[in-house]
Image: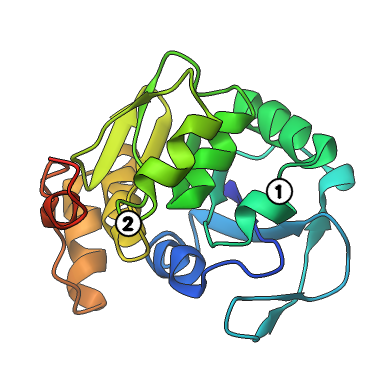
Amino acid sequence: MRTLAAFVFPGFETLDYFGPIEMLGGLSEEIEVVTVAKASEPVPSVHGQKIVIDKQLSDKDDYDLMLIPGGDSALVECVDDETLEWISRASANAERVMAVCTGTVILGMSGVLDGRKATTNKMDFTSTVHLAPNVEWVKEARWVEDGKFFTSSGVSAGMDMALAVLADLFGNNVAEEMAIGCEYDWHKEPHWDPFAKLAGLV
């Protein structure tokens, strides 16, 4: 059984979080999802729904897997020393680290992506990537794998990334079955990214 630290903050993007959790949490006998936040109170998403917290940052930093969703509020709620230091420690301990959208920017600001390739939301790309200047930002990619780090573009791209992680950990057949079970059209090619062109990045 692997533990998955799914980090949330006020205003997190709902599909950034629940999309990958639908895929990864579907293997309930293999992966235990642990919702983590700075404080113990329920945390509201950008759409107002509140999620109950399992662990605080101060409780634990040694999880097997890690997920950081994005959201416009990430660049306000997650840039404090406590959060960035926890991300750095938890990333060092984790077997796989995943981030979606501006969650990748926060991951980059913690320093763990220095010298590594990563991507983020294409619509906010030029206005955010300068916050983590030591990351090798990839303009055209649905998701990027660099070592144990998997980062994805915006919102729905997190589901493709999560399926890629399932394939990496458990085999392609497991990921295929999960996508079919969710009736989801999995974009398996990490370089499939029509949104980079729409955003004028390529």
Q: Quadrant of residue 24?
A: bottom left
Q: In front of the other: label 1 or label 2?
A: 2
In this rendered view, identify the residue nearer to me: 160 or 175. 160
Could one spot residue 94 in this view of the protein?
no
Q: What residue appears at the point 89 percent right and 44 percent down from the top-left corner?
A: 58
Q: Secondary structure at mark 2?
A: loop
Residue that appears at 63% across and 76% down: 45
Instruction: Give coordinates of residue 143: x percent, y percent.
Output: 27, 43
How far is the residue under mark 1 from the one under mark 2? 20 Å
Q: Viewer-proximal residue, 146 or 153? A: 153
Q: Which residue is mark 1?
A: 78
Q: Image point 70% across, 53% down: which residue?
A: 76
| Residue carrying label 2 | 123
Residue in front for this viewpoint, 97 or 112? 112
Q: Is residue 151 shown above or below 174?
A: above
Circle 2: is it few (<14), some (14-19), or many (20+) Cα within 10 Å?
some
Q: Quadrant of residue 174?
A: bottom left
Is 23 in front, or is 11? 11
**Residue 28 visible at all:** yes
Label 1 SS:
loop
Q: x and y percent of residue 146 in the render?
A: 34, 24
Percent coordinates x, y for residue 97 in the rendering: 50, 37
Name the amino acid, label 1.
Cys
Q: Residue furthest top?
A: 115
Q: Is residue 1 left or right of residue 110?
A: left
